[in-house]
Amino acid sequence: MPSVKEEGESNGDDFVASPSFKGILNRFIYDSPPKKPLEALGSLKRKLSNDDDECITAVQEIRRITRSVSRASPRPLPFPSPQRQKSQSQPAFPSRRITPKSNHATSPVCNLRDTIPENLILLFIGVNPGIMTGQTGHVYAHPSNLYWKLLHSSGITTRRHPPSDTYRLPELYSVGNTNIVARPTRDASQLSKKEMDEGVPVLERKIREKRPEAVCLVGKGIWEAVWRVKRGRAIRKEEFKYGWQDEGERMGRSPGWKGARVFVATSTSGLAAGMSMAEKEAVWNQLGEWVKKRREEREKEGVAKVAVPAAVVENGDGSVDR
């Protein structure tokens, strides 16, 4: 008789459920999730809350730094207008003097008058009157001009005269004055070559009519203009010389008169610094020796002194009536 197993024991003869039956049972097994939804939601909220706190803290720090920098930094300047930007972007060039065009309508009034009576020993020809000369009516009136000093040191005058003695020179020393250009300017650089050249035939006419023994061109530029007009070209460097010019260069020729000798002297302008004072005096002394000699010869010959017309009267404002 088979034995009966005690409760709780097992062996190979125990009852085993079939696969189909086991599969049906598995369908009814409850599998709980690893974590409850409410717990997961709470964890997510805590994480988001921590992130928000960090973001808020970062934003507050940025705002604090920005306010600190704003208080420490100077207030930015307003943007310049497009027109100002354009002018600021243009390059700045050093100022330079621009020679203005000749405008005879606006030229200063000139009170200077020629002193060219007949029978002069020497006629000085300047470039043009300066502003002070034009205003006063006295030749080479600016204090920096060396004319009156060189006139005396060379022996052409016996003493150093003031510019106000301009109209006494013909009577006292048989010398007179005129200019190649009558228009006053601040300096000779404001004259064009055309203006200089146009003055040459005017000079020729004055010399031809009054017949001085010699003419002195006070400055190289005057002789350059005469050369251009006579020859139609500029004078070459090797052709120029100070002092007496060749006999063929006489000015004012006319039938029955051989013309006036030509002497080229240095400029007396205070702006002319190309030669030393000693070099200028050497040139002017050569002219002075000749003038003194001619005056002595005239006295021996009994030649009448230059007569200044009585109609020439100097006014109180420096102008001269004829």
Image (cartoon, rainbow, N blue to C red):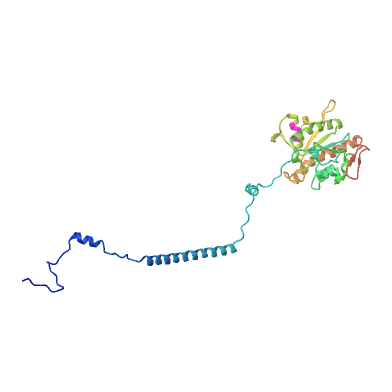
- The reply to whether residue 45 is in sight is yes
Which quadrant would residue 17 be assigned to in this image? bottom left
**Rendered location of residue 227, percent (x, y):** 74, 32
Residue 159 located left or right of residue 198: right
Q: Quadrant of residue 177?
A: top right
> Residue 196, image x and y in percent?
77, 35
The residue closer to the viewer here, 42 or 55, is: 42
Depth order, front residue of 38/274: 38
Q: Is residue 158 above or below residue 77?
A: above
Q: Nearer the viewer, residue 67 or 49?
A: 49
Count of numbered circles in the view: 0
Which residue is pictured at 74% across the width and 35% down the height?
193
Direction bottom: furthest residue:
6
Q: Nearer the viewer, residue 302 or 131?
A: 131
Instruction: Residue 218: name its quadrant.
Output: top right
In this view, which residue lies farthest toward the top? 255
Residue 155 appearing in the image: no
* 180 within the magenta span: no
Above or below, comparing residue 10 to residue 291 in the picture = below
On the image, the x and y values in percent for residue 10 come to 14, 70
Give the residues drawn in magenta, as a range. Answer: 223-228
In the drawing, does residue 117 fall left or right of residue 238? right
Q: Write the residue at 82% across / 40% down.
A: 289
Magenta segment, prevailing SS (helix, strand or loop) = helix
Q: Residue furthest left?
A: 1
Residue 163 placement (x, y as % from top left): 85, 45
Q: Quadrant of the C terminus?
A: top right
Q: Given the current orientation, which residue lies at the most extreme front position?
A: 1
Please give the name of the residue rendered at 19% of the width and 60% of the height, measured from the top-left corner. Answer: 19
**Quick one: quadrant of the N terminus?**
bottom left
